[in-house]
Image (cartoon, rainbow, N blue to C red):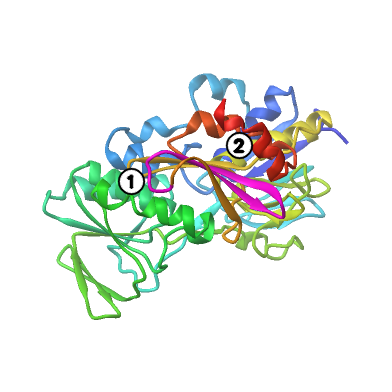
Amino acid sequence: MSLSADDHVVVVGAGLAGWTFCEELRRREYRGALTLVGEEEHEPYDRPPLSKQVAEGKWELERTSLVTPERRAATEVTWRLAERAVELNVSGPFVELNSGERLHATRVVVATGVRARQLPWRTPETMTLRRRDDAERLSRALHSLRPSDEVVIVGAGFIGAELATALVRRGLHVRVLEAAPIPLAAQLGPDIARAIAAKASTAGVNLRTGVEIVGISSEGGYSDVLLSDGSEYHARLVVAGVGAEPALEWIAGSGLATAQGILVNEHFEARARIGALGDVARFPWRGEPTRLEHWQIAHDSARTLAAWWVNGEALAPLVPYFWSDQYGQKVQVLGRPHPEARVHVVRGGLDEDRFVGLYERGGLVSAVVGLNQPRALMLSRPLLVEETSMEEAFRLAPWEG
C-alpha cells in the first residue's frame, strides 16, 4: 500500500542514505509525518571528501554538508539529532531512543551505516576517519605537525590509500602498513590491485605490505608501532583504516537478520513496512545478496525505496558503482568485482596510468574497472545493466566510443 498523509515514517540514520530518502519522499509529494533520527549532532554531510579534499586541506568541513537552506526548506522533517536508537520493534512498529522515548511509526527505515573498526592495540592517540568529528580531530592534529614528522596509516584499503595520498600532498611523510600481501586484492582481485599498489611509490607514499603489527604505544605526543619482525616506527600520528562494520546492534532483538547486513528485496524492503538502505542493506545483485559500502548504493537505494513506497514505482535495478582517488590515480568500478574473476584488459595496460579491465565470471561481464578512464568506463555501463556475455561485450566494445 502506498504512503498517505496519515502515515508517519521514521528514518534512523542521518547520513547520505537517510537524508536522500527524506528528500525523495518530499519530492514525490509525500505529505505525512517524517522523522529523521541521527546519532551525531551534525546535519547530514558527505563522507567521501573527509579522506580526500578535507584531509588534503582543500575543503573546510562545512563544505561537506548535504543540507542547504533550499534543500532544508523543500524537505520538511522532524529532526532528532544527537539521539541514538536502541531498539526496533517491527510489529509496532516503533523505534526506542536512548532517552527511553518511543517513536511510533507506520513505517521505519534503517540507514545507520557502518562504524570504523578499531585496532586491538589502539591508544587514545590512535585515530580513525569515518565521521565528521574524526575529521575535525584529525585536522587539529595535522595543523600541529612539522614537515619532518611521520604519519603511519594502518591499512591500505580505500580509506587508507586515499588518506595517504591526501597527506603526502600536504607535504607530510606518510608510511602505510598493510597486513595483506596485495592491498585490495580481496575487493579488486590480485591483478588490478597489484597494478594500483604499484603507483604508491611514485606518489610519494611509503607502502609496506605483508606486515603484522603486535603493539602500539604512545607517550609524549608520539606513538611507536611495533611489528612482528622486530622493526618499529616512531610516528607523530597513527591513523587506522582497517575497514568498517554495520551499525546494527540496536536492532538485535527485532527479528531482522543482521548477519552481514539486513537482507532486503529489490525495492530495499526488509519486510512489510520496514526498509533498509545503504551500507547496512544486503540487496540482490545478479542473484546474490550483496552489501556494498559505496556512496552510489546509499543514494540509489534511497531513491528506490522512496519510489516504491510513495508511488508503487519499481525503478530500474541499480548498477553498483564506486570511485576512489589514490596515489594520484582515479579508480572507478562498475558492477561487483570478484577476486577470482578473470580480468581482460581491453584498453591500455596494467603497467600504465590508464586502463580499462573487464571482469569475467561465468562467461558474463561482472564488473568493469577503469584507471583514469572515466568516459570509457561510463560508456561501458550498459554491459552491467543487463547480463552481457564476454563475446557480446567484445563485439560491442563500448569503451572505444
Is 309 above or below relative to 117?
Answer: above
Q: Is residue 302 above or below residue 343?
A: above
Q: Where, by quadrant of the figure, is residue 132 drawn?
A: top left
Q: Is residue 213 magenta?
A: no
Q: Residue at x 68, y 35 (%)?
A: 395
Reading the image, the residue beneath label 1 is 327
**Does the magenta run of residues contain 363?**
yes
| Name of the residue lying farthest toward the right | 1
Q: Residue at the location (42% across, 36% down)?
A: 372
Q: Which residue is mark 2?
A: 299
Label whose residue precedes the other's in the sequence (2 or 1): 2
Can you give x and y, in whole percent of width and height, for residue 318 in the image?
Answer: 69, 38
Magenta region: 350-369
Mark yes or no: residue 318 visible. no
Label disc, if present, on residue 337 of the rendered structure: none
Near mark 2 (Cα within 10 A), the count class, few <14, some 14-19 or many ≥20, is some
- Residue at 61%, 30% in the rendered image: 398
